[in-house]
Image (cartoon, helix red, strand yellow):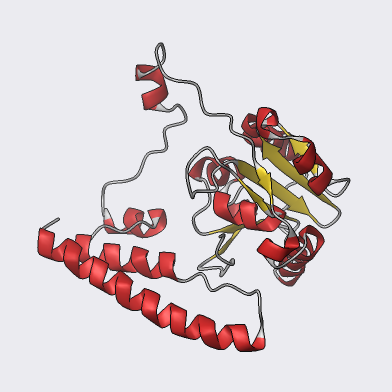
Amino acid sequence: MAQHDITSVMQDVAAVRQDVAALQHDVNAIAPGITLARVVTVMQQAWERVSGVSLDAQALKRSLGDSELVLLLNNPVAIVWASDRPQRPKNKDLALDVDYSGETLNTTLQGVREEMAIGKCGRDGGHLLHEAAWLFNLRGTNIDFNPVFVYAVVEQDSAVLFIDEAQVDDAVKAHLGQEVLAKPYREILSYIRALIERGSMRKVQPVLLVDKANLAVVHMLGEENVAILHGYPFPAVP
Protein backbone atom coordinates (compact mmCIF):
# COMPACT_ATOMS: atom_id res chain seq x y z
CA MET A 1 0.00 0.00 0.00
CA ALA A 2 1.38 3.44 -0.95
CA GLN A 3 2.27 5.95 1.76
CA HIS A 4 -0.36 8.44 0.61
CA ASP A 5 -3.01 5.70 0.84
CA ILE A 6 -2.01 4.91 4.42
CA THR A 7 -2.15 8.62 5.23
CA SER A 8 -5.64 8.77 3.73
CA VAL A 9 -6.81 5.88 5.92
CA MET A 10 -5.39 7.50 9.04
CA GLN A 11 -7.12 10.78 8.16
CA ASP A 12 -10.39 8.89 7.77
CA VAL A 13 -9.90 7.25 11.15
CA ALA A 14 -9.08 10.60 12.80
CA ALA A 15 -12.23 12.14 11.32
CA VAL A 16 -14.34 9.24 12.53
CA ARG A 17 -12.88 9.50 16.02
CA GLN A 18 -13.91 13.16 16.14
CA ASP A 19 -17.44 12.30 15.02
CA VAL A 20 -17.70 9.50 17.60
CA ALA A 21 -16.40 11.78 20.37
CA ALA A 22 -19.05 14.37 19.54
CA LEU A 23 -21.79 11.76 19.42
CA GLN A 24 -20.55 10.17 22.64
CA HIS A 25 -21.00 13.56 24.36
CA ASP A 26 -24.66 13.55 23.33
CA VAL A 27 -25.12 9.93 24.46
CA ASN A 28 -23.58 10.68 27.86
CA ALA A 29 -26.27 13.29 28.48
CA ILE A 30 -29.11 10.79 28.13
CA ALA A 31 -27.49 7.41 28.91
CA PRO A 32 -24.38 7.65 31.09
CA GLY A 33 -22.16 4.58 30.95
CA ILE A 34 -22.98 3.59 27.38
CA THR A 35 -19.93 3.56 25.09
CA LEU A 36 -20.14 3.78 21.31
CA ALA A 37 -18.17 1.18 19.35
CA ARG A 38 -18.24 1.97 15.64
CA VAL A 39 -14.64 3.15 15.14
CA VAL A 40 -13.30 -0.34 14.49
CA THR A 41 -15.98 -0.97 11.89
CA VAL A 42 -15.24 2.28 10.08
CA MET A 43 -11.49 1.61 10.22
CA GLN A 44 -12.18 -1.75 8.58
CA GLN A 45 -14.25 -0.08 5.87
CA ALA A 46 -11.48 2.46 5.26
CA TRP A 47 -8.89 -0.31 4.99
CA GLU A 48 -11.04 -2.28 2.53
CA ARG A 49 -11.65 0.83 0.43
CA VAL A 50 -7.96 1.65 0.10
CA SER A 51 -6.47 -1.85 -0.15
CA GLY A 52 -9.22 -3.41 -2.25
CA VAL A 53 -9.11 -6.47 0.01
CA SER A 54 -12.16 -7.35 2.10
CA LEU A 55 -11.79 -8.51 5.70
CA ASP A 56 -15.12 -10.31 5.37
CA ALA A 57 -14.50 -13.97 4.47
CA GLN A 58 -17.83 -14.37 2.66
CA ALA A 59 -17.28 -11.22 0.61
CA LEU A 60 -13.75 -12.35 -0.24
CA LYS A 61 -15.04 -15.76 -1.27
CA ARG A 62 -17.58 -14.19 -3.62
CA SER A 63 -14.88 -12.02 -5.19
CA LEU A 64 -12.64 -14.99 -6.04
CA GLY A 65 -14.83 -16.22 -8.88
CA ASP A 66 -13.72 -19.71 -9.91
CA SER A 67 -11.22 -19.89 -7.06
CA GLU A 68 -12.21 -20.74 -3.52
CA LEU A 69 -11.14 -20.43 0.09
CA VAL A 70 -9.96 -23.67 1.68
CA LEU A 71 -10.23 -24.15 5.44
CA LEU A 72 -7.11 -25.68 7.00
CA LEU A 73 -8.05 -27.69 10.07
CA ASN A 74 -4.43 -27.77 11.26
CA ASN A 75 -2.48 -24.57 11.86
CA PRO A 76 0.56 -24.68 9.50
CA VAL A 77 2.47 -22.27 11.74
CA ALA A 78 2.10 -24.67 14.67
CA ILE A 79 3.46 -27.50 12.52
CA VAL A 80 6.51 -25.55 11.33
CA TRP A 81 7.15 -23.83 14.66
CA ALA A 82 6.63 -26.79 16.96
CA SER A 83 9.88 -27.35 18.86
CA ASP A 84 11.12 -24.00 20.17
CA ARG A 85 7.86 -22.02 20.17
CA PRO A 86 7.39 -20.02 23.43
CA GLN A 87 4.50 -20.97 25.68
CA ARG A 88 1.38 -18.85 25.55
CA PRO A 89 1.46 -16.20 28.33
CA LYS A 90 -0.62 -16.94 31.40
CA ASN A 91 -1.13 -13.51 32.93
CA LYS A 92 -4.05 -13.24 35.31
CA ASP A 93 -7.38 -12.06 33.97
CA LEU A 94 -9.19 -9.12 35.54
CA ALA A 95 -12.82 -8.85 36.65
CA LEU A 96 -14.27 -5.37 36.13
CA ASP A 97 -16.44 -3.72 38.74
CA VAL A 98 -19.72 -2.28 37.49
CA ASP A 99 -18.25 1.21 38.03
CA TYR A 100 -15.99 0.48 35.05
CA SER A 101 -18.12 -1.87 32.95
CA GLY A 102 -21.38 0.06 33.27
CA GLU A 103 -23.46 -3.13 33.44
CA THR A 104 -23.51 -6.18 35.69
CA LEU A 105 -22.81 -9.71 34.45
CA ASN A 106 -26.46 -10.63 34.88
CA THR A 107 -27.54 -7.62 32.82
CA THR A 108 -25.26 -8.37 29.87
CA LEU A 109 -26.27 -12.04 29.84
CA GLN A 110 -29.93 -11.04 29.93
CA GLY A 111 -29.40 -8.71 26.97
CA VAL A 112 -27.83 -11.45 24.86
CA ARG A 113 -30.59 -13.90 25.78
CA GLU A 114 -33.21 -11.38 24.73
CA GLU A 115 -31.50 -11.08 21.33
CA MET A 116 -31.44 -14.88 21.10
CA ALA A 117 -35.16 -15.01 21.79
CA ILE A 118 -35.87 -12.38 19.13
CA GLY A 119 -33.85 -14.38 16.61
CA LYS A 120 -35.36 -17.68 17.84
CA CYS A 121 -31.88 -18.98 18.54
CA GLY A 122 -30.97 -21.63 21.06
CA ARG A 123 -27.40 -20.50 21.68
CA ASP A 124 -24.96 -17.67 21.29
CA GLY A 125 -21.43 -18.99 21.11
CA GLY A 126 -17.84 -18.83 20.01
CA HIS A 127 -17.95 -15.25 18.81
CA LEU A 128 -15.41 -12.46 18.64
CA LEU A 129 -13.20 -12.51 21.71
CA HIS A 130 -13.66 -8.89 22.72
CA GLU A 131 -17.43 -9.39 22.79
CA ALA A 132 -17.04 -12.22 25.29
CA ALA A 133 -14.88 -9.86 27.35
CA TRP A 134 -17.74 -7.35 27.37
CA LEU A 135 -20.34 -10.03 28.06
CA PHE A 136 -18.62 -11.32 31.20
CA ASN A 137 -17.07 -8.02 32.34
CA LEU A 138 -13.58 -9.54 32.14
CA ARG A 139 -10.33 -8.34 30.61
CA GLY A 140 -7.22 -10.29 29.69
CA THR A 141 -3.69 -9.01 30.19
CA ASN A 142 -1.65 -11.31 27.92
CA ILE A 143 -1.59 -8.63 25.23
CA ASP A 144 -1.54 -4.97 26.26
CA PHE A 145 -4.89 -3.25 25.62
CA ASN A 146 -6.39 -6.34 23.90
CA PRO A 147 -8.97 -8.61 25.58
CA VAL A 148 -7.94 -11.88 23.87
CA PHE A 149 -8.50 -14.72 26.30
CA VAL A 150 -11.93 -16.39 26.20
CA TYR A 151 -14.68 -18.01 24.16
CA ALA A 152 -18.23 -18.47 25.39
CA VAL A 153 -21.42 -20.42 24.78
CA VAL A 154 -24.60 -18.87 26.17
CA GLU A 155 -27.96 -20.61 26.38
CA GLN A 156 -31.22 -19.41 27.88
CA ASP A 157 -30.55 -21.27 31.14
CA SER A 158 -26.75 -21.53 31.24
CA ALA A 159 -23.47 -19.87 30.27
CA VAL A 160 -20.11 -21.59 29.68
CA LEU A 161 -16.86 -19.64 29.60
CA PHE A 162 -13.79 -21.23 27.96
CA ILE A 163 -10.79 -19.73 29.70
CA ASP A 164 -7.25 -20.75 30.67
CA GLU A 165 -7.58 -21.96 34.26
CA ALA A 166 -4.07 -20.73 35.08
CA GLN A 167 -5.25 -17.17 34.43
CA VAL A 168 -8.25 -17.34 36.78
CA ASP A 169 -7.75 -16.20 40.37
CA ASP A 170 -10.18 -16.14 43.31
CA ALA A 171 -11.48 -12.68 42.36
CA VAL A 172 -12.51 -13.87 38.89
CA LYS A 173 -14.08 -17.04 40.31
CA ALA A 174 -16.09 -14.94 42.75
CA HIS A 175 -17.12 -12.61 39.92
CA LEU A 176 -18.44 -15.47 37.79
CA GLY A 177 -20.17 -17.10 40.77
CA GLN A 178 -22.79 -19.74 40.08
CA GLU A 179 -24.00 -17.97 36.95
CA VAL A 180 -21.16 -19.14 34.71
CA LEU A 181 -19.47 -22.52 34.29
CA ALA A 182 -15.75 -22.23 33.47
CA LYS A 183 -14.05 -24.77 31.20
CA PRO A 184 -10.51 -24.94 29.71
CA TYR A 185 -9.92 -22.54 26.80
CA ARG A 186 -9.01 -25.27 24.31
CA GLU A 187 -12.22 -27.25 24.89
CA ILE A 188 -14.46 -24.90 22.88
CA LEU A 189 -14.43 -27.03 19.72
CA SER A 190 -14.80 -30.34 21.56
CA TYR A 191 -17.73 -28.84 23.52
CA ILE A 192 -19.45 -27.81 20.30
CA ARG A 193 -18.72 -31.22 18.79
CA ALA A 194 -20.38 -32.89 21.79
CA LEU A 195 -23.47 -30.70 21.37
CA ILE A 196 -23.69 -31.75 17.73
CA GLU A 197 -23.25 -35.43 18.53
CA ARG A 198 -26.03 -35.25 21.12
CA GLY A 199 -28.30 -33.76 18.51
CA SER A 200 -28.65 -30.50 20.43
CA MET A 201 -28.08 -28.38 17.32
CA ARG A 202 -31.37 -27.98 15.49
CA LYS A 203 -32.24 -25.85 12.49
CA VAL A 204 -35.28 -24.44 14.32
CA GLN A 205 -32.89 -23.05 16.93
CA PRO A 206 -29.67 -22.00 15.17
CA VAL A 207 -26.59 -20.78 16.97
CA LEU A 208 -26.31 -17.00 16.99
CA LEU A 209 -22.89 -15.74 15.85
CA VAL A 210 -21.52 -12.35 14.88
CA ASP A 211 -20.14 -11.91 11.38
CA LYS A 212 -16.52 -12.11 12.57
CA ALA A 213 -16.90 -15.40 14.40
CA ASN A 214 -14.11 -17.98 14.39
CA LEU A 215 -14.21 -19.84 11.06
CA ALA A 216 -13.45 -23.18 12.72
CA VAL A 217 -16.57 -22.75 14.90
CA VAL A 218 -18.76 -21.91 11.90
CA HIS A 219 -17.33 -24.85 9.93
CA MET A 220 -18.00 -27.29 12.76
CA LEU A 221 -21.56 -26.09 13.32
CA GLY A 222 -22.40 -26.03 9.63
CA GLU A 223 -23.76 -22.90 7.96
CA GLU A 224 -27.29 -24.37 8.08
CA ASN A 225 -27.14 -24.29 11.89
CA VAL A 226 -25.88 -20.71 12.20
CA ALA A 227 -27.64 -17.35 12.27
CA ILE A 228 -25.20 -14.52 11.50
CA LEU A 229 -25.58 -11.04 12.98
CA HIS A 230 -23.92 -8.50 10.67
CA GLY A 231 -22.44 -5.43 12.33
CA TYR A 232 -23.90 -6.27 15.73
CA PRO A 233 -23.16 -3.21 17.91
CA PHE A 234 -21.55 -4.67 21.02
CA PRO A 235 -20.23 -1.87 23.23
CA ALA A 236 -16.53 -1.04 23.13
CA VAL A 237 -14.34 -2.64 25.77
CA PRO A 238 -12.25 -0.11 27.72
Horizontal and vertical percent position of residue 171: 78, 42
When the figure is inspected, residue 110 is found, relative to residue 79, above or below; the finding is below
- The residue depicted at 73 percent of the width and 72 percent of the height is 118
Horizontal and vertical percent position of residue 60: 33, 55
- The residue depicted at 72 percent of the width and 64 percent of the height is 99
Hey, which residue is sitting farthest top in the picture?
A: 83
Q: Quadrant of residue 124?
A: bottom right
Q: Quadrant of residue 183?
A: top right
Give the left or right position of residue 43, taking residue 162 as reference: left
Give the left or right position of residue 230, taking residue 184 as reference: left
The answer to whether residue 204 of the structure is visible from this angle is yes
Horizontal and vertical percent position of residue 165: 70, 30
**Residue 173 or residue 100, whichever sits in front:** 100
Number of numbered tags placed on the structure image: 0
Q: Which image quarter holds the N terminus?
A: bottom left
- The residue depicted at 68 percent of the width and 38 percent of the height is 162
**Residue 43 or residue 169, whichever sits in front:** 169
Q: Quadrant of residue 90?
A: top right
The answer to whether residue 199 of the structure is visible from this angle is no
Hey, which residue is sitting farthest right in the picture?
A: 178
